[in-house]
Amino acid sequence: MTLQLIDLSLESPEENLALDEALLLEAEAAAAEGRELGYLRFWESPKPFVVLGVSSALREDADVERCRKDGIPILRRASGGGTVLQGPGCLNFTLVLPLGYTAGLRDINSSYRMILDPCLDALGLADITMRGSCDLALGDRKFSGNAQKRSRYCLLHQGTLLWDFDLDLIPRYLRQPEKQPEYREAREHLDFVINLPLDGVELRQRIAASWKASPPADGWRPPSLETLLEEKYLNREWIERF
């Protein structure tokens, strides 16, 4: 099975998050019919926004009042993990894979290694490693966070790659997280994160090559996002439920 390469950034953060989950639903429906379908998608938000993990606590992680004052949307994604700030200069890579695509994907711990090791090799930089349970770091500073959602037949892996992000925005809108990987050693945000010395185009090329992903041969049309937007990504009750 060849992964379909989708390089598409929609206008709003809500639509971008919804499309990631819509691709998972497409692959799940295909698998239920006995077909294999997988995606590698790249996207980058045109504006900053805070995104909570599926079970993250809103007021523990985000400075809600400052976000509202500055017009920074606070959203929630389908996958787990912690709360992050995204925007221009933060490249998202989304993988939708059947659980049988390669060995090790059915176990969540080994699946991070199976997915992130090829990404590390593709970046080709000295002193980059997987740290904590699912971070990528340059030295001891994080440049990539990763999270997953699993369904019956497939998984959704959502990862970020900082390459030209305005890091000063992070402490403005995010609180210090209560849960931290050991390697963070209680460092403040600006002492913990770093941009990669690669641009967005090169990152896309290297990651796509590592997964041997290619654009759909017969064209591709985005699935409808209306239901997901209504039920989740534009629904303040769902977003603010924790």
Image: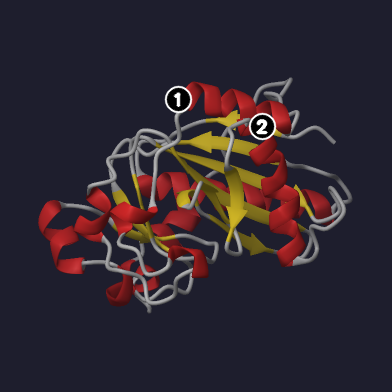
73 or 131, which lies in front?
Answer: 131
Q: Looking at the picture, which amino acid does disc 2 mark?
A: Ala
Q: Mark 1 is on which residue type?
A: Asp
What is the secondary structure assignment of the residue under circle 1? Answer: loop
* Relative vertical location of residue 1 with respect to residue 27 in this rendering, above or below: above
Q: Residue at x 29, y 45 (%)?
A: 167
Q: Quadrant of residue 1?
A: top right
Element type at mark 2: helix
Task: Report the residue marked by disc 2.
Answer: 122
Q: In this view of the protein, can residue 164 be seen by the observer?
A: yes
Q: Residue at x 38, y 79 (%)?
A: 242
Residue named by callout 1: 199
Q: Residue at x 78, y 48 (%)?
A: 30
Q: Nearer the viewer, residue 76 or 29?
A: 76
Q: In this view, does 198 lie to the left or right of 109?
A: left
- 87 left or right of 97 in image: left
Between 94 and 143, the one nearer to me in the picture: 143
- In the image, residue 33 lies at what x, y percent? 85, 52
Picture coordinates of residue 56 (x, y %)?
Answer: 42, 73
